[in-house]
Amino acid sequence: MSIQGAYNRIVLQPINFKKGHDMPRLHVIDPTTESGPGVDLLNGPLKSKQINIFKGIANNANVLEALLGFGQGIKNVLSAAEHEVIALVCAEKRHCEYCTAAHTMVAKSLGIDDEASSNIRQGNVADEKQQALIDFTSLIIETNGFVTDEQFDSFKAAGFDDAAIVEVVAGIANNTFTNLFNHVNDTEIDFPIPAQV
């Protein structure tokens, strides 16, 4: 089942860090009525994922194609669930309600229920390795990457190697783009909105 087909469209209730526009700032590409390279991507590799973020980014097909390639290319050491941990931490740290909602749903499909997602967003889980990933991701965001030797070594001691560290940074970079894009565009949320933490 597609992500788009699985969830109902829900209108965002603005909170203090949102601009609260009535509609997205960018044109929302409609793959059923429009044509062009962005539509080709929406009707091609994104046929089952025609969600609002991609309909907005599709205004620049080259960027959308690059984003899709980067997103796939960075996933080879960490598990899919670990990538969702990174995404949830990034979304929470950057107050991206769209990404929080989207990645809560993706995480659920990987066995991470709403309570576990909430705990990840709060930065407090029982699993030590997952906690290390949350902490290291948070530190990279908070320090702009200037983690200390002790923090770096602690993450490696939790069972992550050099390749995993590169992938964590790449995951943060990928989510930074989507977080900031959604803030600029005020992307309408088309997923159930999880509870605030």
Image (cartoon, rainbow, N blue to C red):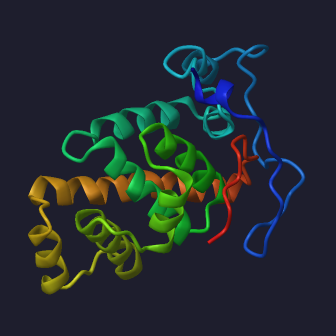
Quadrant in the picture for the C terminus? bottom right
Q: Residue at x 67, y 68 (%)?
A: 196
Question: In the image, residue 44 lies at what x, y percent?
Answer: 53, 14
Is residue 170 toward the left or the right of residue 197 in the image?
Answer: left
Q: Residue at x 64, y 53 (%)?
A: 182
Is residue 166 toward the left or the right of residue 161 in the image?
Answer: right
Question: In the image, residue 49 lies at what x, y percent?
Answer: 58, 26
Is residue 194 toward the left or the right of residue 162 in the image?
Answer: right
Which of the pair 147/83 is nearer the observer? Answer: 83
Which of the pair 100/69 is nearer the observer? Answer: 100
Q: Is residue 40 above or below residue 179?
A: above
Residue 13 picture quarter: bottom right
Residue 166 picture quarter: bottom left
Question: In the image, residue 11 lies at what x, y percent?
Answer: 83, 48
**How many marks on residues?**
0
Question: In the image, residue 2 lies at what x, y percent?
Answer: 58, 23
| Residue lying furthest right | 22
Q: Residue at x 43, y 43 (%)?
A: 111
